[in-house]
Amino acid sequence: MTGFASIVVAIGLGLLGAGVVVAAHRLFAVGATAEVPAYLSGQMPAEHALSRYHVRWYTVTLLFLAFDVEMLFMYPWSLVVASMGTPAVVEMFLFLALLLAGVVYAWREGALRWA
C-alpha cells in the first residue's frame, strides 16, 4: 500500500468511526431537556462554581508556579551553564530573584500558613 493510500484509508476509518459513534448516540440517547445542565449528572448546582474556591488558593497557586517554573528552566540551564559562562549564572540569579519576589509575596499573603 502506498503512503497516500494509507492516509486515505486512515481518514476513511476515522470518519467511519465518528459516524458509528454519532449513530449510536442517536439510537441510544434519552431525550434531553433544555433546563437541566450537564453538570452534576443533570442535577441543578447548589452554588456558583467559583464560590467553592477560597482566595487563599490563588496565593498557593502562585507559590506552586514559582517553584514549578524554577525547575522548568533550571534543568536546561544546568546543561549549558558550563559553555555559557558567567552571563548565564548572572541571568539565572536574576531569574531566581524574580521568582523569590513571588514567593515572598505569597508568604506575606499567608499562603504558607495552613491553620
Image: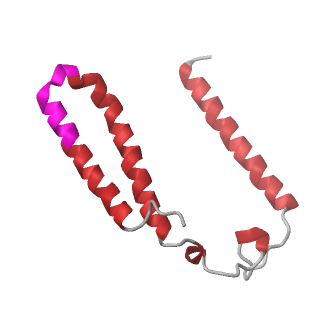
Residue 91 belongs to the span the image colors magenta: yes
Tell me if residue 105 comes above or below residue 34 in the rendering.
above
User: Where residue 7 appears, x then y in whole percent?
Assistant: 58, 29
- Any part of residue 33 in sight: yes
Given residues 3 and 80, the one toward you in this image is 80
Q: The C terminus appears in which quarter of the rendering?
A: bottom right
Q: Is residue 17 magenta?
A: no
Q: Looking at the picture, how far across and down is residue 64, in whole percent?
A: 44, 52
Give the percent coordinates (x, y) of residue 70.
Answer: 34, 42
50 left or right, relative to 21 = left
Secondary structure character of the magenta stretch overall: helix
Does 96 sit above or below residue 115?
above
Judged left or right of residue 113, residue 77 is: left
In the image, what residue occupies the spot 83% across and 72% down? 31
Evaluate whether residue 38 shows in this view.
Answer: no
**Magenta-drawn segment:** 82-93
Up/down of 83 relative to 56, above or below = above
Most distant residue in the left direction = 87
Left or right: 64, with 105 as reference point: right
